Image (cartoon, helix red, strand yellow):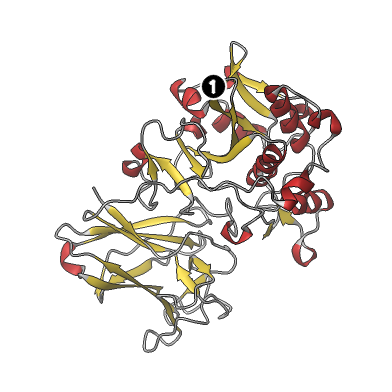
Amino acid sequence: MSKLYYSERGSVVPYLCEELTDYRRARKSLTLPATGKGGILYLLARSSSQSNTPLQVSANGTMLAKIDPAAEDYYRWYTVVLPAELLRDGENSFELWCDSPIMGCWSLAIEGGHENPESFVSTDFGDTWRNWGLGYLNSLRGEYVVRVRVPEGKDPDPPPFVWEDPGQARLKRITNLIPESILTLRDNFETTRRILSWVNLQFDLSRTDQATLYAPWDPETIIAWGRSGHGHYGRKAVAMCVHYSIVATLVFLAVGLRARPAVITRGLNTTDGHFMVEVWLDEYHKWIVVDPTLDALFMRNDTPLSVSEIQAEGGNVGRLVSWGPSHETHPTLPEDWIHGVFLNGECFKHRSIWGRNDFLSHPEHTPAGHGSTCYCETDLIWEAKDLKEGFAAFPYFGHSGYFDAPPEFE
């Protein structure tokens, strides 16, 4: 057994993080139990492929192994072994910096919105520290995304899924967006199939390499910004697979179907992940997985499949894909990704669900930039096997049967 210690949810705005230099240093404090076996430090950071400057890390004043920059310029998880003799029972302090006089070599992820964070910045080589004015623009008060796992303790069970209120006013308003031809259908599977195609056509996909500002998890806004190409501050907004799936999830809820966001990936520190939706259909008594970004679902002998059934197929799952009519007329993701990651089943190696869908009632619980870093949000619930397969920077893992269990409501 082991337990993860952390003080943030992984809600990160990538372009509002902490730049590290020789004079600008970050410190994170975490309270840990006594341990005789050491632990692992996890930090979400971005290195510049244009720099050879390593990241310096210390634990309670003792230098640890340096971290060399990665070849890719995106926020990813880095790990450092923490010897037992360096850790204390109680407060522990971890410091990070790099030997560069200018910003741009290393950036540490921040989650804003904390009143009294245990994250501190120094702008005078570590002589003085403050827990406000964080980030490269000296404007944030938040927590650095730095976590520690030690053998002592046990991660909590996943919390109950949080459902959107069926009577939520804005959820009812979404029905005004949906064509009458869909609303009048009485077959749940056909309704699901038609919603996929309709959502796929509502806006154009815009990736993080095509835009910077992230569209919020708000269906009406996503559709409007995605159509016009203009969003916050008049800039083009990032609207990608996650946004198609959030729109679809809430459309399913609006028509009375139970749906939850589903995340799959080949591995944690890769860009080979995808965001889809699982819909509970009583007639099949299971969650079926659907993809509004590609207007696709998976079928065997005229029966839609769940993620678990797709995973059981192993490698090539392309023969199971049932494309909808808008897949050809409204292409979104590039063909090399579809064939190199999606159809061969690579992105189904690890699966998770987002632990809530009450995005309209509680937008404060939605992430600030999911998909613009590697996975980091604690609302993600992974499979139990993934704890030992590179996902130990997360606190929640579902055991056998958890993901396939029928929806429960409070």
Amino acid of disc 1: Val
Q: Which residue is mark 1?
A: 317
Residue at figure coordinates x 57%, y 62% from the top left: 14
- Residue 108 position, x and y percent, is 47, 67
Identify the image quadrant of residue 12: bottom right
Count of numbered circles on the image: 1
Label 1: how many Cα within 10 Å (few below 14, some 14–19, many 20+): some
Q: Nearer the viewer, residue 152 or 409?
A: 409
Residue at figure coordinates x 50%, y 82% from the top left: 132
Q: Nearer the viewer, residue 130 or 212?
A: 130
Numbered disc 1: secondary structure: loop
Identify the image quadrant of residue 204: top right
Left or right of 344? Residue 6 is left
- Residue 254, above or below 237: above
Left or right of 407? Residue 58 is left
Q: Nearer the viewer, residue 158 or 336?
A: 158
Left or right of 394? Residue 105 is right
Residue at figure coordinates x 15%, y 66% from the top left: 85
Identify the image quadrant of residue 148: bottom left
- Residue 315 position, x and y percent, is 47, 23
- Residue 402 position, x and y percent, is 42, 35
